[in-house]
Structures are given as structure tokens and as C-alpha cells.
Image (cartoon, grey):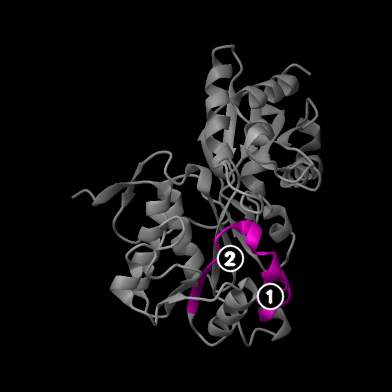
Amino acid sequence: MAAESENLTLVQAVRDGLHTEMERDDDVVVMGEDVGKNGGVFRATEGLHDEFGDNRVVDTPLAESGIIGTAIGMAAYGMRPVPEIQFLGFIYPGFDQVVSHAARLRTRSRGQYTCPMVIRAPYGGGIRAPEHHSESSEAMFAHQPGLKVVIPSTPYDTKGLLTSAIRSPDPVIFLEPKLIYRAFREEVPTESYEVPIGEAAVRREGTDISVYTWGAMTRPTLEAAETLADEGIDAEVVDLRTVSPLDEETIVESFEKTGRAAVVHEAPKTGGLGAEIAATLQEEALLYQEAPVERITGFDTPFPLYALEDYYLPEPARIEDGIRDAVEF
């Protein structure tokens, strides 16, 4: 008999993943600003307070350092907290707690304590938000040993990756691309399931160039690939899903097939994960390379407001141009 499923948006898949794990494990606790009775700013936790009550869905003060620090203490003593930071751009007051404590707890205690917590945060631009609401700073967290950084791009992966993150014995930064929170729907199993952390997904097979991306940039990248197919350019699109640890095996395997590469991300170019992917290809597959690795990214500026937002984000036409440059080199 076929498994039951629901047709969910990405944000509904977040809520479903939280509900499923809270139902399965009494140690899972959701906490954050307005996550309780209000259901969160994007309604990702809607209804959880009514079902699980004040002790497991906790409305916190507006203090990111306090939210994360409290969650670290809970995790060290056996609970599995899932703190929400309303927007990734608000996490900086809690950055010290993340990198100095959550990421290091296992090593500094010689394995006596672990930190099984998931920090959820909507991230990225495209929704006409004010300042500090549109950051894409995943590279800052990918640089920290001891942290896993997960970024889903589909509802199915969202629930499965969130389940894996909650069950992980170590801290996970779980970034949710809010631009596509409600952009499309997908069948998501109602039962519990896991999508492995650290495994990329090839969203489109191709032979001419490997295009690596993640999060909200996956959809415009696939759109660009389909347009270029009409021109005879066959692009393979690899959705990383996890940016720490990187799935180097899939990244290199794809590049060895195509010999060309482009990376698409909305974060600024300098120090972005596109550079890490390019360096990995240089180290692991240099003799297969036929052209420079193209980086199609945001710009090295603070994220702009309103009028320039669409210009800042890589969109299909700019992605197409970058892929053409690599293929025609």
C-alpha cells in the first residue's frame, strides 16, 4: 500500500517536521520569539503550542544570545531544543554562543557532553524586507568546525533534513529559504523519514557543465538550465542541500563528467562558498578542468532595499550568461 502524503509548501513541511519529531520524542522543545501562541512570524510553528503546551513550545524574550545560550544548556543535559531565530540577520548577537559554545561543546568536554540542537532561521532575500532581514551568511557558519549547516530547497527535503538535524547528536544550523516558503507545493510523506545530512542531490542530469547551488537559488538555476537546453547547452544542476559538510564526492564526480563548472549563490562573492567549491575542484579534479569556474553570486555590498533587490539576486538571465561564459571559454 502506498504511503500517505500531503501536498505541502516548504514552510508547511517545516511545521510538519517539527510536529512529527515532537510527537515522537518528548525531549524535542521548540523555542523562540513569538513561536508559541502566534505561531511564528512566518507561521512555521502554527498550532504547535495548542497541541504541546507552554513547556514544549516556549515564547522567549527578544534576546538571541539568551535564546541560543539557554538552548545549549538544555542540549547539554539531554534535551533536543529547536530554537528559532526570526531572521538569520538577527543571529549576530548570539554568534558567540554558537561558535564559542555550541560548536565546541563536544571537543572541549572531551566527549562528555554533546549539543544536540537545531537553530532554525529563515534566510535570504527577495521578499522586500527591511534591513537585517535578507542576509545570506551561511559561509560564516560553514567555516566553524563542529557545526553542520543545512539548507533545503524543496518541501520533501525540508521535512527529511529537519528530522535528521533534530536527531543529530551535534548542533545544526538549519537555514530556510523564505523566498520559496510558499512558492510551490510537493508531496511530503505524513510519516517520519530522514534525508541524510551531507548528501547533495543532482536535480538535473547534464553533460556540458556542472552548476552547483542550494536553497532559493535552485529554482532559477533549473529554469536557466532548461532555457539553455534549447540552445544546445546541457547543464547538470547539483543542489548541495548541505553546505557543511560538503558532499565533495558528488561535486567532483559531476565535474569529472562535464569539465566545466559554475556556482550560483545569493551571498556576496568574496569569501562565499563558491570559492570553496572552486578550490575543491582544483584540488581534486584539476586535470578534468576545461574552463575557469564561474561564480554567479550576490554582490560585495550590504543587501540592498526594495528597488535594487531583484538586481542583487542572481536571476535566470544572469545565471544563463554565467553558464554561457564557462561553456564558451
Q: Is residue 245 above or below residue 324?
A: below
Name the image quarter holding residue 27. bottom left
Assign a secondary structure to mark 2.
strand
Residue 28 lies within the magenta run: no
* Quadrant of the frame with the C terminus: top right
Q: Residue at x 69, y 60 (%)?
A: 141
Question: Can residue 92 be found in the magenta stretch?
Answer: yes
Q: Quadrant of residue 313?
A: top right
- Residue in front for this viewpoint, 249 or 10: 10
Q: Nearer the viewer, mark 1 or mark 2?
A: 1
Q: Is residue 208 left or right of residue 51?
A: right
State which region is magenta: 80-105
Q: Give the amino acid type for the residue marked by disc 1 in the picture.
A: Gln
Q: How many callouts does the rendering have?
A: 2
Q: Is there any visible trace of residue 254 in the rendered image?
A: no
x, y (%) of residue 75? 54, 81
Residue that extends furthest to the top in the rendered view of this protein: 231
Q: Is residue 151 above or below residue 53?
A: above
**Side of 119 relative to 55 (left or right):** right
Q: Which mark is residue 97?
A: 1
Mark 2 residue type: Val
Q: Within 10 angstroms of label 2, few (less than 14), some, or many (20 or more) residues?
A: many
Q: Which mark is residue 172?
A: 2
User: Going 57% across and 24% down the picture, which residue do you hit?
Assistant: 224
Q: Could you tell me residue 262's position as x and y percent?
A: 70, 32
The tag on residue 160 is none
How far across and down, in percent of the image, does residue 239 sit?
56, 41
Q: Position of residue 249 (x, y in %)?
A: 64, 47
Residue at 51%, 76% (x, y): give it: 60
- Residue at 73% across / 58% down in the picture? 140
